[in-house]
Every structure is written in structure tokens, then in C-alpha cells.
Image: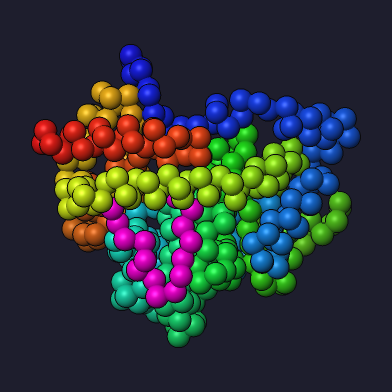
């Protein structure tokens, strides 16, 4: 297939890692020591991550999906249990619930793309064991009402923070609110590595201890196993890469926030044809990190095609809500069950937002969107 002549790209990894020397030096050092599994850098990175985000424990795992899955298992969530989450997430959220044996139950979302606490409360049944709010696109879910519901109904809260390392809610980092939280270091996340990796955070000492066993075969020491478990560890090499990227996270998120502010300003006159969702629906201060910058328009497909012809890479996250996926058929949902999420899936357009964009790139994208609006 012929590739367009991209002028403004959504992807940015070649830019981010075009001078990889500082990463390669670290990898060389680890290779010389042969310290590949749960090595020094992996242990150091866990401490660093926990300290940076003000959480007691951080446990490195193989990916963000495992971070959720292992949290469910360690909390005793099992077959017959129901776990409430959002239908507009990446498929991994519901996938982790289902593969842990529980039934994913969905609750609709708000204009800021995060789960609606009122809808959560309505979805609770006698089988509900946990709520999984997703901090989607770098926007924090509204944690206080969710924690309040969880407390009243005696439910666990496991935050899906895969897209949201360094997001703040009421001046505290996400990942510190629930019983546990799962982060992803997938190449397209804000703390991104050269493959797969993830982190579980928790303030609960006993749960942290259990999770360290769950990610490493249930091994108490080299030879003794307490219970049968999984193998899902964050590689030492990947932890070393993550540590370098983490040290640059403030600068990167600041640049993204500047890009978002410029988009907000340049697109504001196009409302309601181009809708910029509100990010201040919570009653407390929030600090989103713009993992993605997502606008809404009734002419989703047309706009994406128009932008592509102008060399601008725009995508949809995510075009098919989870409850309408083939994998979710057995849950019995149908179109119309989650109208806000479904409407967003039909209208969302993700614009390039990464930290390597220049103001002239944002101006170029916004001029193209204005042109589209004039012509349509
Ligand atoms: C919201 C969300 N949850 C979970 C995951 C799973 O993370 P991973 O790809 O590291 O397994 C991702 C990312 O891929 C995600 O975006």
C-alpha cells in the first residue's frame, strides 16, 4: 500500500530514540554483568517509580495487561465475580478481567472519556467484587466518588493507569488511590520502553508481598514455592530503559501540555463542529498528561481522510467499543447500551500530540481542520 508523504506524524519513536547511545551503554553494562532477571536495575527502578509517584510499593511485571491480571488474582478475584469497568478502553482492561476468570461488566463514560461514577453505582450487583476505573488518554478518572462507592459496597478498586504515568488527581499521582494499579511501558505509553513492560503499584504491604510471588512462579526463594503462579517480570534491560525515560517524563509531559493548550486555543472557534471534551469534570484539581489528544466531530472518517491527504496522521482510539467486540458476545450487550461511549467511538479523532512536535506543526494541523470545516 502506498504510504502518504507524512508531514505531521502521530508516531514518534524514531525521533525519541534517534540518539540511543545512553540506552545502549546501560544495556552493555547489564550484559557484561549477565544480570538479566530481577537484576539490580529492575530493583532500583521499582524503588524509583514508587518514590516518584508517592506510592509505597512498585512491582515490575511483563506488561500492563499482566499488571491488571496479577492484581485481580492476588486480590482473590475469581470465576463468578463481576468487575465493573469502562467499555471505551483498550481491550486489555476487559481482557485481564475475563482471563482472571471474572465477568467484565461495563458502565458508560463521561465527556472526559472516564467512567461515570453514577453509572458504576447502577451496575453493582451482589456478585460485584471490584471497580476498574481507566485513566484514559492521560485523563484521571474521578477517583473520590469511585472510592466512596467502593467503600459503601465493600469493593476493591484497581486503577488501570496504563496510559497515565504521572497523571495527577487532587495533587496526588494516580496509582496511589486504589487497592492496586496497573501501568504499561508499551512503546506508545508516556514511560515507554523497547518492548513490553509494566508496573503494579500498591500501598498495601501484604498485597505487595503477594504480588511479588504472583509475578515470579510463587517462589519464596530459589527452591521453595508457596503457590502455583505466573512468570511475568520486568526485564532488567527494560527497567534500565524505563528509568532513563522516566527521568525525562516531566519535560515530555510539559511539552505535550503546551501542544494541547495550543490545539485548544486554535480549535476553540470550531465548537460545536469540532468538539474539545471538557477536562474539568472532577470537583478537585486534575493534571492530565495528554497521552492522546482526542477531539470529536460528526464527520470522523471524512476528517481523517482529509488530514491524511494533507500528510497528517490521525487515528481513532478506539473505533469499536469493547462491549460490541466479538470477544464480548457472551456478555450479552448490544448497540445502544452505552450511548456516550458509542457516540464517542463514532466521532473521536486522535490528533498528533507528541513532545517532538513544533508549534508550526500544530498550526499546520489546525489550519487543515479549519479548511475541512469550511469545505464541509
Ligand atoms: C488502557 C490500557 N489498559 C491496559 C493496557 C495494556 O498494557 P500492555 O500493552 O502493556 O499489556 C493498555 C495498553 O496497551 C492500555 O492502553
Q: Does the stretch in magenta take in 285?
A: yes
- Residue 60: image x %, image y %? 69, 52
Q: Measuring 86% from the left and 51% from the top, which residue is drawn there?
A: 222
| Residue at the farthest bottom position | 152
Q: Measuring 35% from the left and 30% from the top, which residue is drawn there?
A: 313
Q: Nearer the viewer, residue 23 or 153?
A: 23
- Residue 137: image x %, image y %? 42, 51
| Residue at the farthest right position | 33
Q: Nearer the viewer, residue 61 or 139?
A: 139
- Residue 309: image x %, image y %? 26, 23
| In the depicted structure, whether residue 219 falls above or below residue 237 | below
Q: Is residue 28 left or right of residue 9?
A: right
Q: Nearer the viewer, residue 54 or 187?
A: 54
Q: Which region shows up in magenta?
A: 276-291
- Residue 291: image x %, image y %? 46, 47
Q: Measuring 33% from the left and 36% from the top, which residue is drawn there?
A: 363
The C terminus - image quarter: top left
Q: Is residue 250 visible?
A: yes
- Most common SS among magenta residues: loop
Q: Does the stretch in magenta take in 305?
A: no
The N terminus - image quarter: top left
Amino acid at each position: 500500500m502506498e504510504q502518504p508523504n507524512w508531514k505531521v506524524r502521530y508516531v514518534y519513536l524514531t525521533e525519541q530514540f534517534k540518539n540511543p547511545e545512553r540506552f545502549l551503554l546501560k544495556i552493555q553494562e547489564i550484559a557484561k554483568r549477565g544480570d538479566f532477571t530481577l537484576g539490580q536495575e529492575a530493583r532500583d527502578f521499582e524503588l524509583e517509580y514508587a518514590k516518584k509517584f508517592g506510592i509505597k510499593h512498585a512491582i515490575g511485571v511483563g506488561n500492563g495487561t499482566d499488571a491488571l491480571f496479577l492484581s485481580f488474582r492476588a486480590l482473590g478475584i475469581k470465576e463468578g465475580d463481576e468487575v465493573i469497568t469502562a467499555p471505551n478502553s483498550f481491550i486489555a482492561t476487559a481482557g485481564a478481567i475475563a482471563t482472571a476468570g471474572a465477568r467484565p461488566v461495563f458502565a458508560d463514560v463521561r465527556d472526559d472519556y472516564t467512567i461515570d461514577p453514577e453509572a458504576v453505582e447502577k451496575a453493582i450487583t451482589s456478585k460485584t467484587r471490584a471497580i476498574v476505573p481507566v485513566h484514559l488518554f492521560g485523563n484521571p478518572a474521578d477517583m473520590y466518588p469511585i472510592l466512596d462507592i467502593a467503600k459503601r459496597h465493600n469493593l476493591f478498586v484497581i486503577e488501570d493507569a496504563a496510559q497515565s504515568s504521572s497523571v495527577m488527581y487532587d495533587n496526588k499521582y494516580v496509582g496511589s488511590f486504589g487497592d492496586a494499579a496497573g501501568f504499561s511501558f508499551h512503546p506508545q505509553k508516556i514511560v515507554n520502553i523497547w518492548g513490553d513492560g509494566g508496573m503494579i503499584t500498591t500501598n498495601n504491604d501484604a498485597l505487595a508481598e503477594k504480588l511479588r510471588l504472583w509475578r515470579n512462579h510463587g517462589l519464596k526463594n530459589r527452591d521453595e514455592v508457596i503457590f502455583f503462579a505466573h512468570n511475568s517480570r520486568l526485564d532488567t534491560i527494560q527497567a534500565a530503559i524505563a528509568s532513563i525515560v522516566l527521568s525525562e517524563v516531566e519535560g515530555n509531559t510539559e511539552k505535550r501540555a503546551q501542544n494541547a493548550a495550543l490545539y485548544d486555543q486554535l480549535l476553540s472557534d470550531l465548537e460545536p463542529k469540532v468538539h474539545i471534551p471538557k477536562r474539568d469534570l472532577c470537583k478537585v484539581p486534575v493534571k492530565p498528561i495528554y497521552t492522546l489528544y482526542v477531539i470529536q466531530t460528526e464527520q470522523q472518517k471524512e476528517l481523517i481522510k482529509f488530514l491524511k491527504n494533507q500528510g497528517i496522521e490521525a487515528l481513532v482510539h478506539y473505533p469499536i467499543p469493547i462491549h460490541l467486540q466479538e470477544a464480548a458476545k457472551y456478555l450479552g450487550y448490544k448497540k445502544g447500551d452505552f450511548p456516550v461511549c458509542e457516540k464517542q467511538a463514532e466521532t473521536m479523532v486522535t490528533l498528533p500530540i507528541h513532545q517532538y512536535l513544533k508549534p508550526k506543526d500544530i498550526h499546520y494541523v489546525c489550519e487543515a481542520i479549519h479548511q475541512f470545516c469550511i469545505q464541509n
